[in-house]
Image (tube, grey):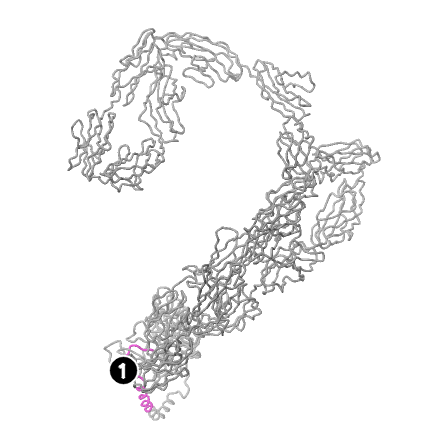
Amino acid sequence: MCTSFTFLSFFNISDDVVPYFKTEPGLPQIHLEGNRLVLTCLAEGSWPLEFKWMHNDSELTTYTSEYKYIIPSLQRLDAGFYRCVVRNRMGALLQRRSEVQVAYMGNFMDTDQRKTVSQGHAAVLNLLPITSCPRPQVTWFREGHKIIPSHRIAITLENQLVILATTAGDTGAYYAQAVNERNGENKTSPLIHLSIARDVGTPETMAPVIVVPPGNRSVVAGSSEITLECIANARPIQELHVNWKRNGVRISGGLHSFGRHLTISNPTSADTGLYVCEATLSGSTFDAATAKAFLSIIEPPYFTAEPESRILVEVEETVDIVCRAMGVPLPTLQWYKDAISISKLQNPRYKMLSSGGLRIQKLRPEDSGIFQCFASNEGGEIQTYTYLDVTNVAPAFTQLPVDTTVTDGMTATLRCEVSGAPKPAITWRRGKHILASGSVRIPRFMLLESGGLQIAPVSIQDAGNYTCYAANMEGSLNASAALTVWNRTFIINPPEDRVVIKGTTATLRCGATHDPRITLRYVWKKDNTVITPSSSSRIVVEKDGSLLISQTWSGDIGDYTCEIISEGGNDSRTARLEVIELPHSPQNLLATLNSSHSHTVMLSWVRPFDGNSPVLYYIVELSENNSPWKVHLSNVGPEMTGITVRGLTPARTYQFRVCAVNQVGRGQYSAETSRLMLPEEPPSAPPKNIVASGRTNQSIMVQWQPPPETEHNGVLRGYILRYRLAGLPGEHQQRNITSPEVNYCLVTELIIWTQYEIQVAAYNGAGLGVFSRAVTEYTLQGVPTAPPQNVQMEAVNSTTIQFLWNPPPQQFINGINQGYKLLAWPAEVPEATTVVTIAPDFHGVHHGYITNLKKFTAYFASVLCFTTPGDGPPSTPQLIWTHEDKPGAVGHLSFTEILDTSLKVSWQEPLEKNGIITGYQVSWEVYGRNGSRLTHTLSNTTHEYKIKGLSSLTTYTIDVAAVTTAGAGLATSSTISSGVPPELPGAPSNLVISNISPRSATLQFRPGYDGKTSISRWIVEGQVGAIGDEEEWVSLYEEENEPDAQTLEIPNLTPYTHYRFRMRQVNIVGSSPVSQSSRVIQTLQAPPDVAPTSVTVRTASETSLRLRWVPLPDSQYNGNPESVGYRIKYWRPDLQAPSLTQVINDRLEREFTIEGLEEWTEYELQMQAFNAIGAGPWSVAVRGRTRESVPSAAPENVSAEAVSSTQILLTWASVPEQDQNGLILGYKVLFRAKDLDPEPRSHVVRGNHSQSALLAGLRKFVLYELQVLAFTRIGNGVPSSPLILERTKDDAPGPPVRLVFPEVRLTSVRIVWQPPEEPNGIILGYQIAYRLASSSPNTFTTVEVGATVRQFTATELAPESAYVFRLSAKTRQGWGEPLEATVITTEKRERPAPPRELLVPQAEVTARSLRLQWVPGSDGASPIRYFTVQVRELPRGEWQTYSSSISHEATACAVERLRPFTSYKLRLKATNDIGDSDFSAETDAVTTLQDVPGEPPSFISVTPHTTSSVLIQWRPPRDESLNGLLQGYRIYYRELESEASAATVSKTLKTPSALRAELTAQSSFKTVNSSSTLTTYELTHLKKYRRYEVILTAYNIIGESPASAPVEVFVGEAAPAMAPQNIQVTPLTASQLEVTWDPPPPESQNGNIQGYKVYYWEAESQNETEKMKVLFLPETMVKLKNLTSHTQYLVSISAFNAAGDGPQSDPRQGRTHQAAPGTPSFLAFSEITSTTLNVSWGEPAAANGVLQGYRVVYEPLAPVQGVSKVVTVDVNGNWQRWLKVRDLTKGVTYFFRVQARTIAYGPELQANVTAGPAEGSPGSPRDVLVTKSASELTLQWTEGNAGRTPTTGYVIEARPSDEGLWDMFVKDIPRSATSYSVSLDKLRQGVTYEFRVVAVNQAGYGEPSSPSMAVSTQVETPFYEEWWFLLVMALSSLIVILLVVFALVLHGQNRRYRSCSTGKSISNMEESVTLDNGGFAALELNSRHLNVKNTFSKKNGTRSPPRPSPGGLHYSDEDICNKYNGTVLTESANLKEKSVDASESE
């Protein structure tokens, strides 16, 4: 009881809590489609709680413990109201609705709308319907522009567009764009087309009208706002006003949008009422328009009375549950009990009260539960609930649990039903474990609603006792039951449907598992009939239940059921057994000819037995003309017993056989029918591809291809060609072509220019076949055969003849009349024919004119008619004279004997007499006085006249004119002054150019002096293209008889060309000098005028054509050369496809190869030139054909079938025509044994009519890889792909190999073998047979072993006995050939001796094989099993095993697969059971015989050599392929048909033949032999302008190699064979050379020379400087410009023609003239001290001539002490490029300039330098002391101040007394030294020296020390230098010297004052010095200024002139004016100074 009490207290019902919701639903939710939605139901109450979900009041789920509801991907249909229901034992509670919205957007309806309104009225455009959630945002557009609301445009709350007071401008297309703000979608509506109708009477003002009235609105109290809308229309719209009133009171607040909208914020019940919208028009008398709307407020419901949360009532009592609610409108109430509507319960005891409450009568315990009251109206929904607790009743069992037995895996249900109030809580326990209760749940254990326990599935462990406990507040009770569980019996290995072949054993399994406590019983049924195994020995039921049926037959077919019966359950399975076999062969197969269809045979048979497996289909095979059987019909329906075999070919024999196929396989074939012969029939198809083309004007070439081979219906005998005039009913003419091989016919003797229709039919022995569709073709046009008729001619004037004629008779025109040619030629010059072409006029008499004839000339004239081929005969010539006309001007007017009153005028007769000259008129007048003219007429023989009576010094105008009968001609006029003879005129001036166009320019000028007579001619000369002083001038234009001209239009200029003009003027005396040149102009660009010329096309390759042309010369570019190029247009004339183009941007290009074309196809091509402005005209179209090639595709539909163990039949279809690329000569079958053959072999099928091949001699049962390719004469095409795999059929195998007996005992042997080398199938096993050698041959003991066994032991043998063993293998086809061996049962065995006497008979040696013979050695008492042969290739090859399976009985062996003409050695070893012997001795070297070369010569090139020869070059075959001694080469060549006629070559080759045999006789090959040492050969005497084909072979004594691929060449075009001759190179200027030459010899030109290429380069650097100039005109002179001066050039020239470039000539030299050099390459300074420096410079990079020397100029940048001295030094020669300068001033910056000189000085190189000391250099050394000894001087000093860096050394400067300039004396004295000694020998005797020391560091030379005292270099004084001797000598000579000096002073003073200028102080002085190469190279100048006898007076006093250094140049004061430092001044008196200081005086 204690335990029970505890349990009851745990389930005390008073503690239960009614469910309640923790949260209530909120506002509607909007979600996107596809999103995941999770709805939660948060509730609490007594556990367990269960939840259920509802959607739109429909159940979504049942009650579960899951409080969430998940929608993984929201769809539109998921939108709606969701409720959650929660329950526990107390009852169920319903949650308020939760709304879920799904955002989506539909589409507008897709039709445009139209709307028309009258002008002035309002247009309301409704938004077209669209579904959307939420409601879309709408924007209106008009023709792409957004519409913004305004005073005239409104958008309503319903998204309508309202246009007020419409006008015509509102017409247009409107549309709206709707946007779903939630999902972002937007849609555009269809267009709404608005039209505004204009009413004539539309007034300017219109009364107000409410267009969109307000509607009644309701709003929920508490909303944020509500908007009322009212839209009105009136005119004018600006005066319209909208007002609002509520309950008669005007509203002023909340108005917007021009008063159209009234918004009420936070509406309450006080805002309800009637609202009036009023529209008025200001300033009008119209009544106001009004509209009304009512606004109501919705109040959400609220409870005024609610029930208590818990109501306790006794059973059988009545209870009222109150629920009252209020709201606007009044809410409706609905009651629920435990979440189920009271109305659905339909309990008569439940009654709704009028107050809203619920009354329940006669309460029962089951009325306990949760009652819910819902109140709802438009404003919302609320709910309240109570728990009704009916008085308690103690629990009581209504059904007790009972013991239950179940099978494992089933469901067990333990019943336990209890009553009580409140409802008792049920708990199930097993032992102490609670299994299920209201709060406990365990998997598989489920508490049922009834209180029972369900266990699913039951397991064995669930067996035991289960107790049901029931309890409520009134008490508790329990009851128990036992559960027993058995293992379930079921079939785990059921029988399966079986299909077995007849005679085999069928096994049907039936394995089961079961509880060991029970027993099983198996029952088998067949077709529901129990099988009793004891009744038949064939049927056995095994212990495991399997059913075995042996020797199955058709009676065993049926459904077999295995039933298992047991207490643990029963089970059964059924399976089907089918017994099948091969179908039998069809019977009574009959084949009969079909009389109604000649190409068919009727087959019939009797349906065979199907082998219990339905016949799937029949296979019909046929043998045609004894060929192998092949399947003809592979899928004949099983219901058929006869069939018509179609598609047979007449005149062939056929046999048929049929077999049936079922599931087992293919049955036996029926008996073959007797052989049927189909009768021959006429060909059933016409010939194909009929092509007719007019060859001449009386012949048509017709070509065709034979009918398809299957349509021949017999052996073709020939063709019938018939033809007749097209469109006429006449009879056909016929031509019989008696050979089927001839596929063309030239139909001759036809009518000129006539259309024929032509048909061709084939015929055989049965008759004529079908004629082809007629093709029509014209014969070519002929030339007319009759001249025009009724020809009349007359001269119209002096230059024109008129012709009148009638056409020739139409029948004589012979073509299309292209027009007429009028011919006229002077009687004296018949070759000068003038031709005028007249277009045909088909109406009336023809007429035409020839103009521009010579005047008064006799012409012969005639007329001819012409067609496209040419001209017809001309009419009879008639002699016509052109009329006489006025003569031309007289020539050479001149004046002589000019006196004051007379002069003589002379002239010559006019060139253009234009008639018979009757005389001359001479007239004259005073210049400018018209009334004074006098005229005199002279005879026609007079050519001079003396005019008298003139006034002196008067200018006259004199005219002379010739006279004919037609009148006086053009007068030649000139002015002349009497008494003043005429003179040469002056040059024009002021040339101005304007109006520049591509081809002309205007030249304005001022005429020059006229030479006292009139100007008769103006001459304009110009430089064209190349402008410069050295360029030539050419005459461009002349203007005559315009004496007063000041402007000339210069015509015929070349576009885009530079010009510079000059002029001359000519009078009667002669030509003036040339004027000054004009400015340089460039004419404008223009498109090219001409197309490239000489356009030819040649075949380049199979896919390319080579186009050649003559490029435009420079003068015809008409534009920027960089923009000049060529455009090629090409197309296929047989297709309508658009043409393709290629652009070549190289203006000098002469040929181009067009790639990517179709093989063997004709193309037409044209060219044009272009520049930046545009393109020129197209050239005449040319035709070319690509070369024949190899097929680019493989044969189609390749199939293979093995017909025997050694044969495979291949069939294929032809290569698609577009991929044949030439004439198919045949096919090659490539075949290779997969994984066995290293390389594929080939089988050739000649001719393209055969499309099958039977490969024979193949290996048995081997898988072959097969491919088929087609070949043309060029070579092989593409092999078919993928590889076809086919296996030959199996056969009996060959013998096993390598049979040995490794273990031999006295009574047993073990035999070992290897599988056959030729298994010929799948080896199924081996048979070993053995017997005593002495016994009968038929007494074998036989043993069979499996296919994987490789050894066998034979026992119980007799000792020391010989046994014969025979071993054979077996395949499906039977036992193969046996291998026999003998063995002796002995243990005395050893290895065999090697074979001996190896011999190779020479007679047995071939090119690739030999025969080896030998004598076997001792077998070592063990028989030899096999031999092994090895081969070694000499000289360095390794031994290779040829075969190791040579029969033991063999004494010879054929060794194959050797290389021809190769030496070999061979050796042999034997093998017995013990092992291998040693190798035998090697054979002597044996050489295989020669064979034909294995490959042809390679890299063959054939190039034109001359116009009738070609040069052939090749590379010999590889040595390893020669196969012998090469004797030479054979060259086969033949002439090919022209490329044009090749278009019609037949593409079908009927007769199989070799490569050369298919060619017709007239184009067969010719042969030339060439030596083996040559690799080039010239073929000569070929025909010009023909295509040739060349093939090469190599040959030796055996024969020829295969032929090379054919190479085509066009003969007739060859590059020039020789270079131009007599080349001369002449220098013109420093930058120009003139080159002249003669053309190559005519016999070497090989055609017309198109131009020359001039190569020129600097002699020293060809690779860097070589240039090339192309001349496209046959000129033989060129000027090379822009060359480098004074440079040796080499010039080489080659000529070219259309075929290419000829050889270059040997280079010729030429050197340009010298020019001024360039700047020196550098200018550098070194050793810069305070007074000296070294200057050096580099040789100019461009010397431009022979360098003669240099000029150095230097000067201070600023004057020094008032003087700016410029010093110029000329250095002669090129070797010295430095100068020592010694006259600098300390710290002064100098400006240096250096220039080089050749024939003139070049530009200067400049630099500045500052004299020392340098900044940062050391200070001056101190205490300089000089001591002198007998032999040397010693200088001592003290180191001065250090500079920026340490002192690095010292230098010593010295100043000799005889020069006066400091110069560097000693350099590079170490820094550590403070003294230096110098030998007196190094000093000049008698000279006094001063020294100073300079310190040096990295910054430079420092400040020098103070000079030392002067030191004399006097050594021991001789006597004559003693003082006394000198005194005597001085006194002795004193008088003489004084006299001489006095005289010299007087004389020198006079000279000095004459040659030297004395004047004021001068500040600029120039000094020029020239240094010769032989002189000392230092120029030493100090900073002292020149002083000449006190001429230069300075404030600082005067200084002496500079003195030269030792070894330098000496000068004295007297020669200061002419020399400087001993160098010659370049200018006389070059001392120039200018004043610096104005205060200085003389």
Q: Quadrant of the C terminus?
A: bottom left
Up/down of 1315 relative to 1992, above or below: above
Horizontally, residue 2018 falls left or right of residue 518, namely: left
Q: Is residue 1869 visible?
A: no
Q: Can residue 1898 be seen in this view?
A: yes
Up/down of 1550 relative to 1513, above or below: above
Horizontally, residue 377 falls left or right of residue 1782, namely: left
Q: Position of residue 710 (x, y in %)?
A: 63, 43
Horizontally, residue 1137 falls left or right of residue 1574, namely: left
Q: Where is residue 982 in the image (x, y as percent from the top left)?
A: 34, 82
Up/down of 862 relative to 770, above or below: below
Type of residue at label 1? Gly
Quadrant housing residue 273: top left
Q: Determine the residue positioned at 24% across, 37% down.
A: 121
Magenta stretch: residue 988 in it? no
Name the foreground residue: 1568 vs 1508: 1508
Q: Label 1: which residue?
A: 1959
Q: In which quarter of the image is the N terminus?
A: top left
Horizontally, residue 284 falls left or right of residue 815, namely: left
Boundaries of the magenta span: 1941-1966
Quadrant housing residue 1330: top right
